[in-house]
Amino acid sequence: MNIVRFAPSPTGNVHIGNIRTAIFNWLFARHTKGQFLLRIEDTDKERSTKEAIDRLLECMDWLGLDHDSDIFYQSSQEELHIKAAMKMLSHGNAYSSKNSDNSDKKTIVFKLPYDCSTVKNVREVGVAEFNIDPGKPVRIALDGLKFFYINEKKKSVETAASLAGFKGLKVYDENGSVVFELEKHISEIHKSDCAFSFENCSKISFIRREVFYKDLIKGELAKPLDTMKDFVILRSDSSPIFHLSNVYDDITQKVTHIIRGDDHVENTYKHLFLFWALGADIPNYGHMPMIVNHQGKPYSKRDGDAFVGDFREKGYLSDALFNYLSLLGWSPGDNREKMTRSEMVEAFSLDRVKSAPAQFDIVKLLNINGLYMAELQDDIFLSLARTEAEKQLWLDSSLDSKLFSDVAELMKSRVKLISQVADWKYFFFDESPLFSGTGGYTAELNSKAFSYDEKGLKKAFKEKDSTIGALSEFMRIFRQRSFACAACYESSIRDTEKELSLQEGKLNQPLRIVLTGTPSGADLANTMAILGKDRIINRLEKLLTIINGVF
RNA sequence: GUUCCCAUCGUCUAGAGGCCUAGGACACCAGGUUUUCAUCCUGGUAACAGGGGUUCGAAUCCCCUUGGGAAUACCA
């Protein structure tokens, strides 16, 4: 059975890149009927917080990312990680290294194995040679080889790497004679930590080896050992480093597939050796492309606008976010985009994941959100809208629910994001800064007031006097009538137009903007039916009184 | 510096040597429906980064260049 895990460190808000990793892991697990595990990597005690964990859990819950079995807290494993490091030390797979600041404290460093004969993921790729800068020393010690080589541009380039990278190393002096053979001294170096240093060298040669593995997404990947360094696994305060903890826990949790961000491929080469040293089989790896922001730069935890929680706040539907995120770097291969959870689970496979980074496009997200919005059941939409309206402070719970549901029904088809219910103000409140005579547009908006669109107003009142005249006539006719249905409102407009010999529809725009403050909205007659006779007269009167002062 | 990765419309993508005159979606533009707006419908603009090979044939395979990105921590 496949076992995957999502292993975030709870050091802040989860961002979309993170959560997409979780989504792909989840999709993979559900598709293959495997397990999706959640491991909290909370070993960084200074930066890990309970709040961050809670927020993470909320986000996962919101997105329907249910995990199998209990949450695994990495901090609970610390003792085991330390033990493992000590065991590697005693087995010769690690050594302790003095702190650079000369204190007595020591770190435990993992030693890439010089003898790779039992490491399946290492292979020889041929003989390599470097021309050495004779003015600089070649130094050989337990912690690696240091030298300066002459590159193509004839520059002296400093290099330091693990001894394991230089199988069969030979160091040549300026006459071309071999002055050192690593093979003859390697056990001595490992045993006694002795160091060699040579001046005036001309060349080094060695058998190049590389670590390799087959990435489920990116194909076969490899890295030469002579570009790798031994790495710390236990800090000088004895706390374990990410690489150790991460690998150790993956073994403990029997993880079979590690699906994570592209930024981890370099780590993988290190981890391969750790799996070997810990006596475990290596799992399958898949590295997914990063999500980049609008500038094409990678998102980081510092990108304040890409937190999952923010999308929730802004009113995005979790299904829409999930759907959109799953389409970043993956596609089902046909032309489907909007898919249900089960369709995605059904269609998902790692070999369809792209390896190029994908740019996050908020406009497309909005579009998909609108698609999901449109198919929301009326009662669900209503309660979402209601919650949103109350959240925005300008609506209290005493509001007539008949009025609210009428508005919601009328407006539903044009809402792409639930937070757009903020645009419904004119249905519920009769005040506007424009009426108050404070100069209108620049006045601070009262939270319980709707605003007028200046451009729309100017446009509708382009022929000011005749428009005001027409509206006055409309009001005269309107007052005399009673309205049983939306069609009655409609005919009151049409009749006025006839009376004034105006083209049909000519009154719509002025009337709309006077009544709602905006040039766009739902069907005018329906809008009027919701507002009702009294409020309509009220608004018309107010606006006609002040309109001369506005322009 | 070094190592590694990546490269199709503005964006997300389809594309496994001939189904490619490069398909879809978003965005954009035009037209239609709706007496407004949105929805909806129809149509349109728009891409294989560049250069070399391999091949009868290349978006697809190889090489080089260019451009992006990552890693190179006692962060995770």
Image (cartoon, rainbow, N blue to C red):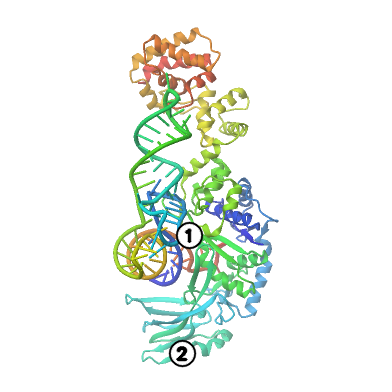
Q: Residues within 10 Å of mark 2 (few under 14, many from 20)?
A: some
Q: Which residue is under mark 2? A: A180
Give the percent coordinates (x, y) of residue A154: 32, 77
Real-space CA distance between mark 2 and mark 1, rounded to the nearest whole angstrom: 44 Å
Image quarter (top left, top right, bottom left or bottom right) of the N terminus of chain A: bottom right
SS at mark 2 in the image: strand
Q: Is residue A407 above or below residue A203?
A: above
Q: Amino acid at mark 1?
A: Ser
Q: Chain of mark 1?
A: A
The amino acid type of the residue labelled 2 equals: Phe
Sequence order check: which comes first, mark 2 or mark 1? 2
- Label 1: state its secondary structure: loop
Q: Please name whichever residue, B52 or A233, is drawn nearer the observer in this view of the structure.
A: B52
Q: Are marks 2 and 1 on the same chain?
A: yes
- Residue A400: in sight, yes or no? no
In the foreground, A75 or B24: B24
Q: Residue at x 45, y 8 (%)?
A: A476
Q: Which one is closest to the eye, mark 2 or mark 1?
A: 1
- Any part of residue A24 in sight: yes
Residue A493 found in image quarter? top left
Q: Is residue A510 left or right of residue A448?
A: left
Task: Point out residue A502 in the picture as x, y percentages from the top left corner.
Answer: 37, 14
Residue situated furthest top in the rendering = A480
Q: Give residue A223's position: percent from left, percent from top.
A: 48, 72
Residue ID at (50%, 21%): A431
Question: Circle 1 is placed at which residue position?
Answer: A355
